[in-house]
Image (cartoon, helix red, strand yellow):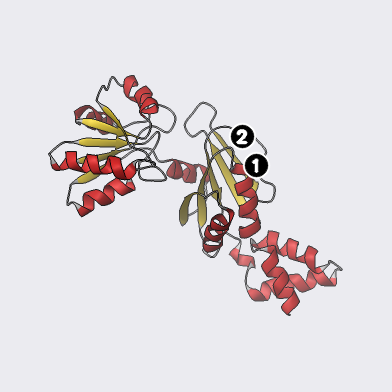
Amino acid sequence: MLYLVATPIGNLKEVTHRAIEVLESVDYIACEDTRTSKVFLDNYNIHKPLVSYHKFNENQSGEKIVKDLLDGKNIAIISDAGMPGISDPGNILVKLCQSNDLPYTVISGPSALVNAFVLSGYEPPFTFVGFLPDNNSKKNKILEDFSKINSVLIFYCSPHSLLEDIKDMHNVLGDREVCFVREISKKFEEVSFSSLQEGYKNTLKGEFVVLVNKPNLESVTPEKIDDKLQALLDLGLSKTDASKVIAKLTGRKKSDIYKDIINN
């Protein structure tokens, strides 16, 4: 049996009794980073053989794990923190189990995206996007695709990419309310609110979950937009400035609104 085991995101006490029992019972544990996992496992006196299983060796290591599962071994897979298979290695191994008709299960526990969504206080539905790619064209394509849905968008961001990611989100999604959640369940856990235009002004340290709230669709009907645009133009605002105001009110892209003005 393969066990996908959730491990603590921050506070090492946030782990289930079942997770501990499973980790104590398996033949070995596949880890994203054996050094990181050893800190957690040593805290609970779990001394099982550890093997490396990360995004750079998923296929090769996965084949070895499948062979051991076929030989009747029980194996656990854990990520550095949270639930494996969500922006962390694990989903390829699940697919290998499916194709080889091998049993597998999930051991419930922490997941950063769930914790962050609850901390935000936003209303469902939500859509998990995960980490954005470094490639700008791929990043913009993903953001364009998700800009069309009425849903809270949940992103994972590293501190070195956060500011650039926020800038790209603002360019594509328009100005929306955003919640930044940092250092979940740790001593310096932080939940702060801003807008995509204002960005993030606090400490750039630790892993971030960024939740972009739904666009203000109440103001996005064509008739309402036309009325607001005309009122702003009548007040003497330029087409560019009027587009900026409507973009902030509606969450639409400034460039799309400007095109509407030009075409009318």
Q: Which residue is label 1 attached to?
A: 200
Q: Amino acid at mark 2?
A: Leu
Q: Secondary structure at mark 2?
A: loop
Q: Return the x and y of residue 258 as percentages of the image width and height.
A: 73, 69
Q: Amino acid at mark 1?
A: Tyr
Question: Which residue is depicted at the point 17% across and 48% down?
Answer: 102
The residue most toward the left is 72
Q: Quadrant of the C terminus?
A: bottom right
Quadrant position of residue 108: top left
- The foreground one among 54 and 76 is 54
Q: How many marks?
A: 2
Q: Secondary structure at mark 1?
A: loop
Q: Return the x and y of residue 202 as percentages of the image width and height.
A: 65, 35
> Would residue 117 be found to the left or right of residue 35 on screen?
right
Question: Which residue is depicted at the point 71% across and 72% down?
Answer: 259
Q: Return the x and y of residue 233 as percentages of the image width and height.
A: 82, 71
- In this rendering, the answer to whether 223 lies above or below 139 is below
- Disc number at residue 28? none
Quadrant position of residue 13: top left
Q: Return the x and y of residue 248 as percentages of the image width and height.
A: 69, 59
- The foreground one among 87 and 55 is 55
Q: Which residue is label 2 attached to?
A: 204
